[in-house]
Image (cartoon, coloured by chain):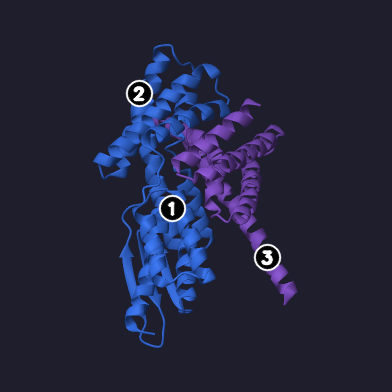
């Protein structure tokens, strides 16, 4: 429960930092909460971090697309806020810390993992875009 | 079509593109918007080449192709401006806006200061930091230290960004400040887990948006934008990391 609340506030807070229009702040928080809940649920069910990130980024992107279409705003507004909780900031920090402490093996390990995760965030986003385009194009094809 | 009119159309397209790029829109959105605006003013053939530091735009008509280049030196994230330019471009596409009106509306967006006030931004950063601490399984006892460190770090970031033009250095200073405050609070007994506090407070500085945008651009075939955004993100991450590292070496 506290996770729901904090992820909502954190995402909305980021909305303020990125200067999202005021009326979108609540929706940003909502997207962020759903993404984080998906991620938490999947990782606690024992799923691999990378796969869980791909799936929750996908989830975030799908909801953002829905919102973007409904409210006629650029999709980036919602994806940014929704994705921030998934960004592997902690892991990148751990990697840096190990670099400083001259433990290069652990550091490279963590850095590679952080890179994989940020890649998988992008993968999730791109996937949803692909699916969206497929749906749109196939509908157009039917109409012709 | 008269010569001057074509240049005016280019001017409007480029202004829209510039505003979008400076406010942190995606590369494909910038290109798409400029070409749409050109098309709705009667120029179906246009090409754009967008990188994070400049836009090249050319229109093809019966006369020789006209091309213009503008330089982008400032990049921030201001999604409200992106939304507004997007709205204007929609209106233009619907066809009920003249060229002059479009130009005026875009200029209005350009000069408007739409940002949330500075205290609110700092407050948002510090509250987000605290919330991130909880999200990363931190203890509630560390909530206040993360609040303080995150807020102050962000304050330092924005404050020095106004004085210095070097982004790398301001980020370095901000993360060093976060490290120092967190360390001080933990040493004095106000905080318990140093790692968690630092991770939470650093989050407002982390270039998460840049990294994901970079990978997306790369996948979409915008190779140059992708690489340069990636480089920018890496520099930022490196600045944050080294700021923290400097503090940690004093442990």
Direction from residue A65 to residue A77 in the image, left or right: left
- State which quarter of the image contains the C terminus of chain B: top left
Direction from residue A70 to residue A88 in the image, left or right: left
Q: According to the image, label 3 marks what residue?
A: A136
- State which quarter of the image contains the N terminus of chain B: bottom left
The quadrant where residue B241 appears: top left
Q: According to the image, label 1 marks what residue?
A: B81
Q: Earlier in the sequence, mark 2 or mark 1?
A: 1
Q: How many marks?
A: 3
* Element class at badge 2: helix
Q: Colour of chain B?
A: blue
Chain assignment, label 2: B
Instruction: Tell me what residue is drawn at x 54 percent, y 44 percent.
Output: A23
* Element class at badge 3: helix
Estimate the spatial distance between the alpha carbons at disc 2 and disc 1, rounded to whole Å: 35 Å
Judging from the image, what is the letter of the chain drawn in purple? Answer: A
Q: According to the image, label 2 marks what residue?
A: B180
Between marks 3 and 2 in the image, the one whose residue lies nearer the viewer? 3
């Amino acid at each position: 429960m506290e996770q729901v609340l904090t992820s909502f506030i954190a995402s909305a807070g980021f909305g303020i930092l990125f200067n999202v229009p005021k009326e979108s702040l609540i929706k940003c928080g909502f997207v962020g909460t759903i993404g984080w809940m998906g991620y938490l649920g999947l990782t606690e069910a024992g799923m691999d971090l990378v796969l869980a990130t791909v799936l929750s980024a996908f989830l975030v992107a799908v909801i953002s697309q829905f919102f973007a279409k409904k409210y006629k705003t650029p999709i980036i507004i919602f994806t940014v806020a929704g994705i921030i909780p998934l960004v592997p900031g902690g892991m990148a920090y751990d990697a840096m810390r190990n670099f400083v402490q001259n433990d290069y093996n652990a550091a490279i390990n963590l850095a590679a993992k952080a890179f994989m995760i940020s890649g998988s965030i992008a993968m999730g986003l791109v996937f949803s875009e692909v699916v969206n385009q497929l749906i749109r194009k196939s509908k157009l094809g039917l109409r012709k | 079509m008269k010569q001057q009119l074509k240049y005016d159309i280019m001017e409007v397209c480029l202004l829209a593109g510039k505003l979008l790029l400076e406010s942190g829109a995606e590369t494909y959105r910038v290109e798409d918007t400029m070409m749409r605006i050109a098309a709705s003013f009667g120029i179906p053939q246009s090409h754009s080449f967008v990188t994070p530091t400049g836009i090249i735009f050319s229109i093809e008509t019966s006369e020789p192709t006209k091309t213009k280049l503008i330089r982008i030196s400032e990049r921030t994230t201001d999604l409200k401006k992106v939304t507004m330019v997007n709205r204007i471009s929609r209106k233009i596409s619907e066809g009920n806006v003249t060229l002059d009106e479009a130009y005026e509306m875009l200029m209005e967006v350009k000069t408007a200061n739409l940002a949330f006030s500075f205290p609110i931004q700092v407050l948002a950063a510090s509250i987000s930091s605290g919330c991130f601490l909880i999200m990363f399984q931190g203890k509630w006892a560390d909530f206040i230290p993360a609040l303080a460190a995150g807020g102050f770090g962000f304050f330092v970031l924005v404050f020095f960004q106004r004085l210095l033009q070097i982004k790398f250095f301001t980020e370095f200073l901000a993360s060093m400040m976060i490290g120092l405050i967190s360390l001080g609070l933990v040493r004095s007994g106000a905080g318990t887990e140093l790692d968690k506090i630092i991770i939470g407070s650093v989050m407002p500085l982390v270039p998460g948006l840049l990294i994901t945008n970079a990978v997306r651009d790369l996948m979409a075939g915008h190779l140059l934008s992708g690489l340069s955004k990636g480089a920018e993100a890496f520099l930022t991450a490196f600045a944050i990391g080294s700021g923290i590292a400097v503090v940690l070496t004093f442990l």
